[in-house]
Every structure is written in structure tokens, then in C-alpha cells.
């Protein structure tokens, strides 16, 4: 899984350990029917390069398995203790109403969605051990930024602003891992944006897009624009 260049963005965990000392959560019991599906998901993330084996961490969290309709399991991590100790990142997310107003001015636009967006950002090497979680199969930590961390949204938005600052509010609107392209793209034959600047920039910076969630040349309505950003 390619990621964004660490020279552009990494996720750091700045902790107040005097007020919130490290905690090692005890392993929670899971239903027998879930255990093998949890293992399958952990192995999948190891193979994708998301996880390392981590031992002797001062911070250890539990997983929270979420069963999907198709029978698979999403392995979330309870980072409640870690988040309490984390300093607040003051990088603000955009105002939704401004994005809606900028989008509905146009009759057509295209949608793009980041593929495993958070996981494209690397954890700072010195902080990845703080993301350690425990399972029946061992303890693991994230090499990439996982979901559930306090400042993950701010880190991702900062990365997007760094990459697309010269295009935002002109050719595109960005909210975390959602991108809306405005009619600038309609200048490409058959609305083929594969050679557009944002795709070239995405390719250069190894920013991957989710093809299944991309929609090109959609009609614009105010309610549709609201749904996009909510």
C-alpha cells in the first residue's frame, strides 16, 4: 500500500503523561465465532503493511470488532485512554456551509474519494508503539495512521491542504478524504479527468483514490451537494 511521502505529512502523538499516565488495557473476551474473523482481519492488515508486532508498550488498547452485513469484521481500536492524553491539534476542518455554497454554484461536478485515506499517512516512527492494541493473537501497533485517533482528521486535512492548496476554492473543494471537482474538469474530452492536474498531483504524491466511490459528471442540486459534505 503506497503512502504519502513522510516529508509531506506524518502523524504525531503529543501526550500529557503527567496528567494522563499510560494505561495497559486488559484483553477483553470475544465471542468464539468472532475470533477467527478477527484474526483474518489482523493478518490482512499485516500483509498490507499497516501493522508491526509491538511488545512492551506502555500504551495498550483493546479492539472493538464491528460485524458487517456481509459477515466480515471491521477491527476498530478503543483509543479512549490515548485520546484523553493527546494534545488537541488546532488545525480546523472546513466549514460545511462554505463548501456547499461553493459547490452548488455549478451545474456539473465530479466526486472523488480517498482509498483507505487515513492509512495513506505514516505514523511518526517514535509514536507508532503508542498505537499498540492487544488480541488473542498477540500485540500489534500501526505503521500508518489508524482510525479512531483524536487528531487524525486534522492531520489528514492538513495533508490535503498541503497537496491541493493552489486548487482549493477554484478547481476543487476538499473535506478530509472527499474531493469535489468543479466544471474546470469539463474542458477535458468526454470529461476524462485522468490527465487532470489533481490526478497528476495525486499520482506524484502517491495519493490513491477509491474508484468504487468516484462519480464523474454528476448533476448539481443543492440537496445533493449537502449530502456530499454531511
Image (cartoon, rainbow, N blue to C red):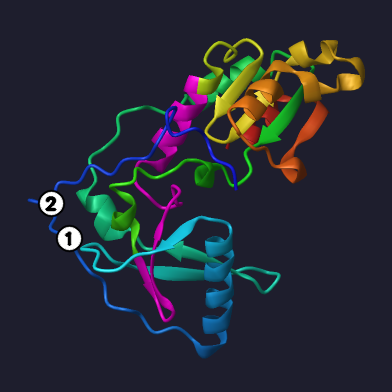
Seen in the picture, residue 227 relative to 199 is either above or below; the reply is below
Q: Quadrant of the C terminus?
A: top right
User: Which residue carries the number 1 mark?
Assistant: 22
Q: Helix or strand or loop: what does disc 1 sit on?
A: loop
Residue 29 horizontal side relative to residue 214, left or right: left
Whole-percent x and y of residue 9? 42, 31
- Which residue does the image show at 56% across and 82% down from the upper left? 36
Residue 136 highlighted magenta (yes or no): yes
Question: Which quadrant of the view contains residue 44?
Answer: bottom right
In the image, the segment drawn in magenta is 133-162
- Which residue does the image show at 75% across and 18% down from the upper left? 196
User: Which residue carries the number 2 mark?
Assistant: 17
Question: Which quadrant of the view contains residue 111?
Answer: top right
- Which residue does the image show at 71% across and 70% down from the upper left? 70
Residue 220 shows in this picture: no
- Which residue does the image show at 66% across and 13% down from the upper left? 171
Q: Residues within 10 Å of mark 2 (few under 14, many from 20)?
A: few
Q: Residue furthest bottom?
A: 32
Whole-percent x and y of residue 54? 34, 65
Q: Residue furthest right?
A: 190
Seen in the picture, residue 26 relative to 99 is either above or below; the reply is below
Whole-percent x and y of residue 172? 64, 18
Tag 2–tag 1 contact (CB < 8 Å):
yes
Residue 162 horizontal side relative to residue 78, left or right: right
4 or 186: nearer the viewer:
4
Amino acid at each position: 500500500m503506497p503512502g504519502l511521502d513522510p516529508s509531506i505529512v506524518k502523524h504525531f502523538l503529543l501526550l500529557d503523561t503527567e496528567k494522563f499516565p499510560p494505561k495497559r488495557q486488559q484483553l477483553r473476551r470475544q465471542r468464539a465465532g468472532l475470533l477467527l474473523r478477527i484474526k483474518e482481519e489482523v493478518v490482512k492488515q499485516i500483509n498490507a503493511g499497516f501493522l508491526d508486532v509491538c511488545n512492551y508498550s506502555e500504551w495498550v488498547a483493546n479492539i472493538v470488532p464491528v460485524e458487517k452485513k456481509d459477515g466480515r469484521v471491521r477491527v476498530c481500536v478503543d483509543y479512549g485512554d490515548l485520546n484523553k492524553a493527546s494534545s488537541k491539534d488546532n488545525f480546523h476542518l472546513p466549514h460545511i456551509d462554505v463548501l456547499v455554497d461553493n459547490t452548488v454554484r455549478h451545474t456539473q461536478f465530479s466526486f472523488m474519494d480517498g482509498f483507505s485515506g487515513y492509512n495513506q499517512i505514516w505514523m511518526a516512527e517514535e509514536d507508532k508503539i503508542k498505537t499498540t492494541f492487544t488480541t488473542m493473537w498477540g500485540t500489534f501497533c500501526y505503521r500508518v495512521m489508524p482510525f479512531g485517533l483524536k487528531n487524525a482528521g486534522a492531520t489528514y486535512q492538513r495533508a490535503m491542504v498541503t497537496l491541493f492548496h493552489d486548487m482549493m476554492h477554484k478547481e476543487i473543494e476538499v473535506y478530509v478524504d472527499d474531493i469535489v471537482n468543479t466544471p474546470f474538469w469539463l474542458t477535458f474530452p468526454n470529461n476524462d479527468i485522468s490527465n487532470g492536474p489533481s490526478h497528476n498531483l495525486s499520482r506524484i504524491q502517491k495519493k490513491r483514490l477509491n474508484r468504487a466511490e468516484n462519480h464523474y459528471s454528476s448533476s448539481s442540486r443543492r440537496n445533493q451537494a449537502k449530502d456530499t459534505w454531511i
